[in-house]
Amino acid sequence: MTADTPTLPRMNILIVDDDKDSAMTLGWLVEMLGQDYKLAHTGQEALDMAPDYNPNLVLMDISLPGMTGYEACQKMRENPALANTIIAAQTGWGEEQHRQKTKEAGFDHHLVKPISVASLKELLESIQKAKA
């Protein structure tokens, strides 16, 4: 980021990815953009953490062990405490059929891995504009 890059208001972002290296790398990107983050490595761990952490945004991998990202998203949608949480799928699958499936599962956004700084910043900016 350059000195003239506007600072985004701070958000809580829950990163859910069973690949610990990918999760940490995405965490560093989130942190570089001035945001707070926590990591979860399973869908159940994300469900357990989310109500207390109160994330503004969840970046959810689709291929998770035990419970898929689709299932975890659907369960989050059932929790009234997470009613205002934005949930974005993060996946290597980017074809229209995959985007449709994430939409049907309740995801607000669909990001294709690897997630670039530019696409992450664009997502954060769109969330801030929607809140305004």
Image (spheres, rainbow, N blue to C red):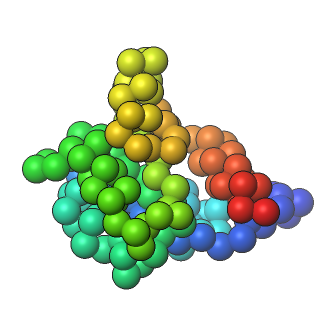
Front position in the image: 37 or 78 = 78
Quadrant hosting residue 6 = bottom right
Residue in the picture at 41% in, 44% down: 106
Front position in the image: 96 or 42 = 96
State the image coordinates of residue 16 (x, y, percent, origin top left): 33, 56
State the image coordinates of residue 89 (x, y, percent, origin top left): 42, 42
Question: Is the residue 79 above or below the residue 63 in the image?
Answer: below
State the image coordinates of residue 121 (x, y, percent, origin top left): 66, 50
Q: Which residue appears farthest toward the right when viewing the image?
A: 4
State the image coordinates of residue 48 (x, y, percent, origin top left): 25, 72
Front position in the image: 92 or 132 = 132
Residue in the picture at 36% in, 76% down: 51
Evaluate whether residue 123 shows in this view.
yes
Q: Quadrant of the N terminus?
A: bottom right
Evaluate whether residue 17 shows in this view.
no
Quadrant hosting residue 127 = bottom right
Residue in the picture at 52% in, 41% down: 109
Q: What is the number of callouts on the image?
A: 0
Q: Is residue 76 left or right of residue 103?
A: left
Question: Is the residue 11 above or below the residue 23 in the image?
Answer: below
Residue in the picture at 24% in, 47% down: 71
Q: Which residue appears farthest toward the top when viewing the image?
A: 96
Question: Is the residue 123 above or below the residue 11 in the image?
Answer: above
Q: Which residue appears farthest toward the left when viewing the image?
A: 66
Q: Is residue 39 left or right of residue 6?
A: left
Q: Is residue 7 left or right of residue 38?
A: right
